[in-house]
Image (cartoon, helix red, strand yellow):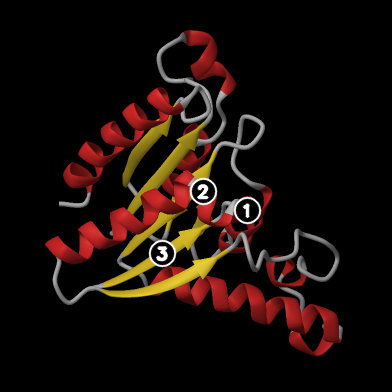
Amino acid sequence: MKLLHVDSSVLAANSVSRQLTARIVAQWQATHPGTTVEYLDLGANAPAHFGPESLGYRLGIDASQLTEAQKRENAVTDAFLTQFLAADVIVVGAPLYNFTIPSQLKAWIDRLAQAGRTFKYTETGPVGLAGGKTVIVASSRGGIYSTSDAGQAAEHQESYLKVVFGFFGITDVRFVRAEGVGLGEASKTAALATAEQQIVAEAA
């Protein structure tokens, strides 16, 4: 079994989501001996956002017509796709930044969203091509969003990730959540304790 461990926080050792992904991976390895892990740190090495060069792959431009910059960006996209498709389990660290995911995590997902690789269009609508995987998202939030209608309407983090991975055909998307970590030490301690219980359950 192959596990892809993805972090996206820019807070290094101060990151709650990085703490959670490390625990999830360790728990998964403990309950699934023999799992191999590949690590991707988007916070340290973020892919470029879409532009004229990185769109070459998506637009299906003939290789002979690509510029050198487009060839380099195509190689980056292909490496991300190959890595993602080879994984059986993907653990994603997703802190809440300004009501949504970090832009570097979005840039990675944009590279994965490739017709013919992770989805296809049919006469009856889009069909995901990356099914059969398990995604475990480590969701960290400074405030509390899950317990009110206003909070749920304001977050575009977990809701987005569930939709986009579902679009790729992945139906087993699990969440380990630590929220309220910015509301004082007592709140952070309680959030991490709750998340630990979720890790044991979701990484079983």
For label 1, the SS is loop
Nearer-N-terminus badge (3/2): 3
Q: Is residue 32 left or right of residue 119?
A: left
Identify the residue under disc 3.
Answer: 5
Do residues under tags 1 and 2 come within 8 Å of each other at their CB atoms? Answer: yes
Tell me the SS state at disc 3.
strand
Residue type at the position of mark 2: Ser
Q: Which residue is mark 2?
A: 15
Q: Is residue 20 visible?
A: yes
Residue 194, compared with residue 112, is above or below; it is above
**Drawn side of residue 180 relative to residue 111, left or right:** left
Task: In the rendered view, tell whether residue 138 sits above or below residue 48.
Answer: above
Query: Which residue extends farthest bottom?
Result: 64
Decide which of 44, 78 is in the foreground and name it. Answer: 44
Using the rendered view, name the quadrant where residue 71 is placed.
bottom right
Circle 3 packing at 10 Å, graded few (<14), some (14-19), many (20+), is many
* Residue 96 on image: x %, y %: 56, 36
67 shown above or below 130? below
What's the residue type where badge 1 is placed? Val
**Image side of residue 147 versus residue 101, left or right:** left
State the residue position of label 1.
10
Q: Residue at x 56, y 62 (%)?
A: 112
Q: Secondary structure at mark 2?
A: loop
Q: Earlier in the sequence, mark 3 or mark 1?
A: 3
What's the residue type where badge 3 is placed?
His
The residue depicted at 75 percent of the width and 59 percent of the height is 49
Q: Position of residue 123 (x, y in %)?
A: 51, 48
Q: Which residue is rendered at x = 63% and y = 72% of the image?
A: 77
Q: CA distance from mark 3 to mark 1?
A: 16 Å
